[in-house]
Image (cartoon, grey):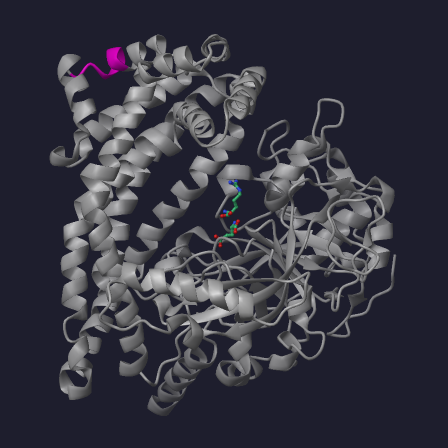
Amino acid sequence: MKNKLLLISFLIILKNVLFAGEGMWLPLFLKQLNEKEMKSMGMKIKAEDIYSINKGSLKDAIVHFGGGCTSEIISSQGLLLTNHHCGYGYIQSYTTVQNNYLRDGFWASNKGLELPCSGLTATLISRIEDVTKDVLMGTDENMKDSERRIIFDKNIVDLQKRIKKEAHEDVFVRSFYNGNQFFAFITVTYKDVRLVGTPPESIGKFGADTDNWVWPRHTGDFSLFRIYANKDNLPSEYSVENVPYTPKHFLPISLDGVSEGDFTMVFGFPGRTNEYLTKEGVRQIVEEQNPVRIELRDEALKILDKHMRVDVNTKIQYSAKYASISNAWKKWIGESQGVKQTKGLEKKEKMDLEFQKRVEANPLFIPYRNIISDLDKNYKDLQNLSLAKDYYAEGFQRNIDLYNCYARIKKLIATYEGKSEKAFNDQKNEMSTNADAFFKDVNTSIEKEIFKTLLEIVVKGVDQALLVPHISEKMKLYKRDYNQFTNDLYSQSLFTSPDSIRILNALSYPQWIAKVKSDPVWMFYEELNYFITYGIQSTAGNLEDNIAGLRKLHMKSLMEVFPEKRFYPDANSTLRVSYGQVEGFSPKDGMCYKTQTYLDGVMEKYVPGDYEFDVPTKLRRLYESKDYGQYSEDGKMPLAFIASNHTTGGNSGSPAIDAHGNLIGLNFDRVWEGTMSDINYDRSICRNIMVDARYLLFIIDKYAGAGHLINEMKLVHPKGKKKKKK
Ligand code: ARG
Ligand code: GLU
């Protein structure tokens, strides 16, 4: 019995060691750092099949989509797969009352009908080079972080001129490991990218905000684009002469699905993580910063929801804004809760103590002895300043539309001062012409309700020594009547309606600027910005600089003090590989999440006519007749699955790849319980969410009838699960 227990616990330990899902690894170092582990987890290909500069490899199919999302090439004709929410803006730009592509979907039946997307770029990585030595040249440890950055920047400019590249290639350099290493990325950016197809929102955004970050999930969050190139296969602006891009590699798509325990890999462009913070750094995020941001957004969302529920127009007007405010809000709530649930702070503290113990024990590490205490001190000094910045950003900028109008006017002034009166007049007239569109999604009475509510929270919550003097004076004057102040602010300003904007912008510069400068909204935001710059940032900037320098040293010392550990660099929007396995988890005592969902779940969630949970008639018919073609599994239509790949924002649209290098899914989200993976990955609850590749194919083929797109792709059976084509 005892032996059996021992064996089981040994196996559990071994499993945890072998199948660590944590890490966003540099493709360049997979061979040294990861290949062995990946193979032990079931990977059948080699590191150089993933990243190689000598031959076509998986990396040649991975594309940075519009700079924010990831996408991948899935045919020899440059067909590009990404999320619906990544393509959203482009789909929306082609949506009209007559052609409601958001509501009904869109499928180009031939290449001539694919829709150009102005401004959309697709960036491929030619190669990655370690340029640490070149960038660090002339710097030393004792410099202030801001001084060091000036030298980096100069070195980088020199390097960009020097580095070997083709005329159509670009180079950019990014800092890794908090400024300890630097890599150059030689890239090719295609500028003619066209919309090929998208399911309706009732599939691509099924479950919308209610289901966002949630498992079990049933969203077919995908859309299709295509890269076009000139006749030499090189980047070119949009032209009718352009032809579909021929990739060096494209991903075959597996029809065999996944099972519990299967190896998975996600290859993409994760945006930003902070995995190596000390306990105090994490504590401030989850116990100080998140609660402030959440409290303000709670109120903004409550007000929006109240109005959106009773009025259809308001619902339409505010749905995009609601989605964007609620996305981060929901993530922060999950993040704080996840750290608490997994005792993240205790774990960080243990790590800090172990670091300190090893540092104290080794004379070589004398320079590292005060890092943690110095970081603590700087974090503590910064806390109230940084909270004040959060109060102001969330209270008056991100969640308030008035701010956008102020920002537009401010830009006009910059145009006048920097360019010419003509450019100024042109932009001013354009603003008047588009004023109705600018205010299309603004309802002033709702905005006022939000402003008033957030104002009160800010005034009461912010460190009183850091309350903007202008606001403090106004509050005294108004005897803290937030309502009256807000009413007066909006009614006395010209920044609040299309009509008032047109009246303002009809004036010539001298009168215009005089009116602007006496506008109460202008004064409010100018005073706010002035105070943030000179009352907060003047001090906060130095502390932030100290922290950046200390974090650089901390990162370097962690790598020396824990030589037995592998360290991956924090995400910074560069190409990374994450790997894990298909696995469920227990989010709470007594609860267990399975790995796979099916179309059946869509029908369980179906609410006829609902804006989040309606199901298109055709999809219901396909479900009823079980008309799933070659895409089903045991008579059911697989829809989404989870695995322990370490991902973050920016990984949206990343391919989930099987042991053989085939596409098995499309990454689009993480489970809410594990969103703290950005600051403290914990395999017990951190999972990424992917649409099953077979569901995409089913929608394209059976729902949209776009079989010509399926014909372009390469469908494979790596597990030999071939079945008869229906
Ligand atoms: N949570 C996903 C991400 O972080 C999806 C966001 C888009 N969907 C939404 N309902 N807001 O980007
Ligand atoms: N939806 C996210 C994105 O747009 C991915 C989810 C995450 O944050 O992991 O990148």
Q: Residue at x 18, y 37 (%)?
A: 535
Q: Is residue 582 visible?
A: no
Main SS, magenta region, reads helix
Residue 262 at what x, y percent from top left? 59, 72
In the rendered image, the vertical position of residue 629 relative to residue 388, given as above or below: below
Image check: 583 left or right of 284? right
Quadrant location, the C terminus: bottom right
Q: Quadrant of residue 551?
A: bottom left
Q: Nearer the viewer, residue 647 or 220?
A: 647
Give the quadrant of residue 435. top right
Residue drawn 41% across the image and 18% down it = 446
Please state if 152 lies on the left or on the right of 254 as rendered.
Answer: left
Residue 543 x, y percent position in the rendering: 20, 54
On the image, the x and y values in percent for residue 434 come to: 58, 19
Magenta-colored stretch includes residue 483: yes
In the image, 103 versus 122, the foreground residue is: 122
The part of the chain drawn in magenta is 480-485
Residue 25 makes an appearance in the image: yes
Q: Write the residue at 32% across / 36% down.
A: 393
As rendered, which of 480 and 343 lies closer to the eye?
480
The answer to which image quadrant residue 618 occupies is: top right
Q: Give the residue drawn at x 67%, y 63%.
A: 664
The vertical placement of 151 against 192, above or below, is below
Asked whether, in this view, residue 619 is left or right of residue 418, the answer is right
**Residue 492 sits above or below residue 358 on the image:** above
**Screen quadrant of the N terminus:** bottom left
Whether residue 715 is situated above or below residue 605 in the rendered picture: below
Find residue 250 and report its horizontal and vertical position in percent. Answer: 74, 65
Q: Is residue 380 magenta?
A: no
